[in-house]
Image (spheres, helix red, strand yellow):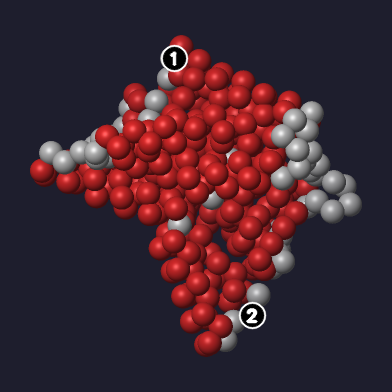
Amino acid sequence: MLDVLTGFLVVVVLIVVGFTVGRMRVLGPGAVHTLTLFVFSVATPALLVDVLAHADLGQVFGVNLAVAVAGSLLVGALAFAGQRLLARRPVPDSLVTMLAASYCNGSNLGVPIAAHVLGNPAAVLPVIIFQVAVYGPLVVLALDLATRRTSPGRTSSLVRELLSGIVRSPLIIAAVVGVAVALLHDRTGFTLPQVVAEPVSLLAGAAVPVALLAFGMSMADVTVLDRATSPRRSVLAAAVLKSVVHPVVAATLGAFVFGLSGPALLTITVVGALPTAQNVFTYAHRFRVGTVLARDTGVVSTGLSLVSIAVVAALLG
């Protein structure tokens, strides 16, 4: 347990350093955007290739993927039902709330936390693949239908755009490459040549610290829960669902449905506790629906998730 808590403390320290750098404007304007793009497009894909090339694929894509899918869908359905049936919100707003409560920050925050708290960056790969390749695109289609922007031609164009985005995603490409290398290694003993493997490893080493610094910097100038513009009750409900209910659901599924315990149970519970992803705001902004809710839930759930992950690490570590 001490190792897990120490790893969590390392994550918090780097976020605080990033926050301080952001407040002091050390890296100038636009730094967060640039660093985040580097992490998403270069460093994290390199890390996934580096890890997957030597990973046990059965362990990565087995129960972890099943819990990621089931947990996200269950919590998302609960959030949608709450907004639609209890709060009487329109379908588009309910869809954004569903994503805010169940779509986790798997890459920018999940990979660093998995690396330092769990000692396994590949632990978040199942949820990343599910969200990027399946969950996100399906909800985007639902949003398009719900906002009445769609027509036969529009739907076909949107489907092509979504499929193109999946195929071109650096994380999906990295996952495919890493899995291919791992399969070749298992069957033929193939390993990446040193001239390729070493640069990949060096870039992979930048993913965790740069991601945490950029994340801390992004929190430096954020104002949330404004009385005039923020749907506070919906934000708090979505944040609690994401950072408290989601890990409880993941732990329950892992322990009582799949019979997990020890490090395996810790892994799926920590992944479930990850906060709302920035992608939710991107989707909301695209359709001009629930943008403030998505933004504020991302911030609030981040604060809650750090507490949740610390509690999970103390209980299950």
Q: What's under tag 1, amino acid-wise?
A: Asp
Helix, strand or loop status at disc 1? helix
Amino acid tagged 2: Arg
Q: Quadrant of the C terminus?
A: top left
In the picture provided, is 263 more to the left or to the right than 146?
left
**Image vertical order of residue 106 relative to residue 210, above or below:** below
Q: Residue furthest front?
A: 195
Q: Is residue 258 visible?
A: no
Toward the left, the furthest residue is 188
The image shows residue 163 at horizontal and vertical percentages of 44, 69
Q: Residue at x 52, y 75 (%)?
A: 158
Q: Taking 16 as reference, is 129 left or right?
A: left
Residue, x 10% and y 43% (percent of image)? 188
Measuring from the top left, give residue 172's x and y in whole percent.
40, 54
User: Residue 215 appears at what percent x and percent y?
Assistant: 63, 36
| Residue 149 - label | 2
Residue 189 occupies quadrant: top left
Out of 193 and 6, give the one closest to the viewer.
193
Measured along the vertical axis of the image, is residue 134 above or below residue 305? below
**Quadrant of the image for the N terminus?**
top left
Q: Earlier in the sequence, mark 1 or mark 2?
A: 1
Name the residue rendered at 52%, 87% in the picture.
152
Tell me the residue that label 1 is attached to.
3
